[in-house]
Image (cartoon, grey):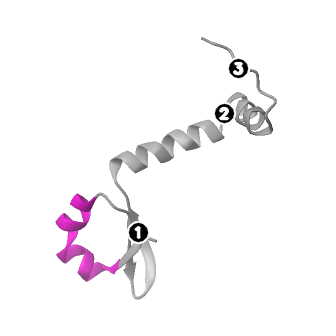
Amino acid sequence: MLGTYNIKEALANLTKLCRSGGKFVISNRNRPVAVALSAEDFEALLETLDVLEDPAAMKAVRAAKAGTAKYRLS
């Protein structure tokens, strides 16, 4: 579960929140307006999106999931 902080709380604790390495939501009047996550999590998210948009990679993922992929040493 993501922690949620209003803008005032987030500003007052920004250093602590960033150093924690966790994910958190910043809200304004009880509505989410921003999500913060570590640089490592952001990079992982971008890599996942790259795989999801690559048809060949997704074909290999589906084959592996179905158990029909052939294993070969590279």
Q: Earlier in the sequence, mark 2 or mark 3?
A: 2
The CA distance from mark 1 to mark 3 is 42 Å
Identify the disc placed on residue 17. Answer: none
Start-end of magenta stretch: 5-20
Q: From the viewer's perspective, is the residue at label 2 or at label 3 nearer?
A: 3
**Horizontal and vertical percent for residue 24?**
37, 68
Please, what secondary structure does the residue beneath circle 3 have? loop
Q: What type of secondary structure mainly makes up the magenta span? A: helix
The amino acid type, in three-letter code, at marker 3 is Tyr
Q: Quadrant of the C terminus?
A: top right
Going by the image, does 32 lie left or right of 54? left
The amino acid type, in three-letter code, at marker 1 is Ala
At x 57%, y 43%, the residue is: 49
- Residue on which disc 1 sits: 34
- Residue on which disc 2 sits: 54
Please, what secondary structure does the residue beneath circle 1 have? strand
**Horizontal and vertical percent for residue 70?**
76, 21
Q: Earlier in the sequence, mark 2 or mark 1?
A: 1
- Residue on which disc 3 sits: 71
Position of residue 27 relative to residue 43, above or below, is below
Please, what secondary structure does the residue beneath circle 2 have? loop
Q: Earlier in the sequence, mark 1 or mark 3?
A: 1
Tell me whether circle 2 and circle 3 mark residues in contact (CB < 8 Å).
no
- Closest to the observer, 40 or 68: 68
